[in-house]
Image (cartoon, rainbow, N blue to C red):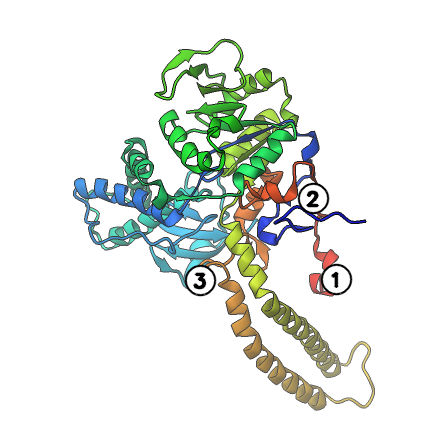
């Protein structure tokens, strides 16, 4: 007798609802799960949020006399996972080895030869301050403004700015000020319907985890007043009057990540909704909210070792790398754009199957062409194994015929390959691929995140009892003839 599955749940989740595993993770053994807030528990309509961040930056630049009145936020200029080359005024997409495969100078896409000349022998190294990784959605407004200001700089319209690095410093300075001055967050709190992307599956996912015995913790760099407003807006409507804090065993605001993981900062208890503070004793008490604190104090207060804590955030370095490398916490990365990518790949499957079939046919024909060329060479120079009765003109004629067939095949492949290269984003293509290779973003995810997903609510579809197994690592010889020569 087979029981019915839970309503709304499939035996296996859809691709966009899945959790992807780099390192095997047994969720049953995880005793506590920490969550970042912005773009993790709380998602935003990124065009609206980043558009307002861009506008605040633009207004500050206008006040300083820069000629930016005509500029407008264009979310399609860049995307997550790209890298700013502040030395050359470029936005680039690199593969997992750090080699640049696509680039823009300012807002203009670079031709292949110009790109190759600019980056011949250059390897992207994120440890070098020359390179700025767009690794969160908050970077979209920054990269857009930078690209547009590079155009103005090339037109000699940025008086007093010396070089592309100074252009970046200008953007960074005014965008940081826009985030810090509070006006932007005040706008969001005043009109959350405009900015926040609600997820009704999130509360059931968190309740499943909590009632399965997991301690749930919020650890955010946002201030108390903003955290309270956003969490109330996103959660209270689904909780029947209990309020968002009923979901979490601990709430930590103004955490100052990544310093939260590397320093022993003091903790202050938030004693009321107005955010009044008192110094906290040596331990954090469950059910309360705190400002500051540190990762070691969280471990001690929960009585849980780092390897039994999973931390989920959207920032590869401040959230995932810091918690993993310093405390051996298990790590989950939220990649919101992954949902769009997976949906695009799913819709493209029939076309991809046809493209793969034609590419396999092309590879077979190219191999035959190479064999004919080698045979002609041996016949002309009189060495090696050669079939009797075959003359060079006949071989050359067959080569010409095969070359003509290859040209016709390429005409069928070209539009399919072009469509494949424009999946997800017309200019930059797929988030996690650069051509047939992994993108630099994919490599960073692979390196730092134990698991990754598009939303926290994907945990709803996998359950709190899932044993996530990493797939067998792929090597070129795993894929058969097409993986080698």
Q: Nearer the viewer, residue 409 or 250?
A: 250
Q: Is residue 284 above or below residue 96?
A: above
Q: Quadrant of residue 154?
A: bottom left
* Sequence order check, earlier mark of 1 and 3: 3
Instruction: Give yes or no for contact between labels 1 and 2 (Cβ–Cβ under 8 Å).
Output: no
| Residue at screen point 52% across, 23% down | 250
Q: Residue at x 61, y 28 (%)?
A: 329
Q: CA distance from mark 1 to mark 2?
A: 21 Å
The reply to whether the C-beta atoms of the residues labelled 1 and 3 are less than 8 Å apart is: no
Q: How many marks?
A: 3
Name the element at disc 3.
loop
Closer to the chain start, of discs 1 and 2, is 2
Q: Position of residue 5 (x, y in %)?
A: 69, 48
The residue carrying mark 2 is: 470
Q: Give how far across and how far down residue 62 sits, in percent.
A: 19, 44
Marking on residue 426 = 3
Q: According to the image, label 1 marks what residue?
A: 480
- 3D distance between C-alphas at marks 1 and 3: 31 Å
């Amino acid at each position: 007798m087979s029981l019915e599955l839970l309503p709304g749940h499939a035996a296996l989740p859809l691709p966009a609802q899945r959790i992807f595993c780099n390192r095997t993770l047994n969720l049953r053994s995880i005793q506590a799960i920490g969550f970042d807030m912005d773009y993790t528990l709380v998602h935003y309509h990124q065009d609206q949020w980043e558009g307002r961040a861009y506008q605040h930056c633009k207004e500050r630049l206008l006040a300083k006399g820069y000629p930016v009145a005509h500029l407008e936020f264009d979310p399609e200029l860049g995307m997550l996972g790209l890298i700013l080359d502040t030395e050359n005024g470029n936005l680039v997409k690199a593969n997992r080895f750090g080699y640049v495969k696509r680039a823009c100078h300012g807002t203009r896409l670079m031709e292949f030869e110009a790109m190759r000349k600019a980056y011949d022998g250059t390897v992207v190294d994120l440890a070098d301050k020359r390179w700025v990784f767009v690794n969160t959605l908050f970077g979209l407004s920054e990269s857009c403004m930078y690209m547009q200001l590079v155009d103005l700089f090339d037109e000699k319209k940025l008086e007093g700015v010396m070089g592309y690095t100074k252009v970046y410093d200008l953007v960074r300075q005014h965008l940081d000020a826009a985030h810090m001055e509070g006006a932007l967050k005040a706008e969001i709190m005043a009109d959350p319907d405009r900015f926040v992307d609600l997820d009704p599956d999130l509360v059931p996912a968190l309740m499943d985890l909590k009632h399965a015995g997991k301690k749930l913790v919020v650890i955010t760099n946002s201030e108390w007043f903003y955290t309270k407003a956003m969490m109330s807006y996103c959660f209270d409507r689904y909780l029947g009057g209990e309020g968002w804090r009923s979901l979490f065993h601990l709430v930590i605001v103004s955490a100052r990540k990544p310093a939260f993981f590397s320093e022993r900062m003091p903790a202050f208890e938030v004693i009321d909704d107005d955010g009044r503070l008192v110094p906290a004793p040596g331990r954090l008490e469950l059910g309360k909210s705190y400002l500051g604190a540190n990762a070691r104090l969280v471990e001690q207060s929960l009585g849980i070792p780092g390897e039994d804590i999973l931390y989920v955030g959207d920032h590869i370095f401040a959230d995932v790398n810091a918690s993993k490398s310093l405390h051996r916490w298990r790590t989950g990365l939220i990649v919101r754009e992954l949902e769009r990518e997976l949906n695009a790949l799913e819709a493209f499957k029939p076309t991809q199957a046809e493209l793969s079939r034609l590419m396999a046919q092309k590879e077979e024909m190219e191999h035959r062409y190479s064999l004919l060329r080698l045979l002609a060479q041996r016949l002309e120079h009189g060495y090696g194994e050669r079939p009797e009765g075959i003359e060079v003109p006949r071989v050359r004629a067959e080569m010409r015929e095969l070359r003509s067939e290859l040209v016709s095949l390429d005409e069928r492949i070209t539009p399919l390959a072009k469509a494949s290269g424009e999946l997800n984003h017309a200019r930059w293509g797929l988030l996690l691929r650069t051509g047939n290779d992994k993108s630099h973003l994919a490599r960073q995810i692979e390196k730092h995140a134990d698991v990754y997903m598009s939303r926290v609510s994907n945990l709803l579809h996998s359950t709190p009892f899932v044993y996530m197994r990493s797939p067998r690592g792929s090597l070129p010889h795993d894929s058969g003839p097409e993986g080698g020569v």
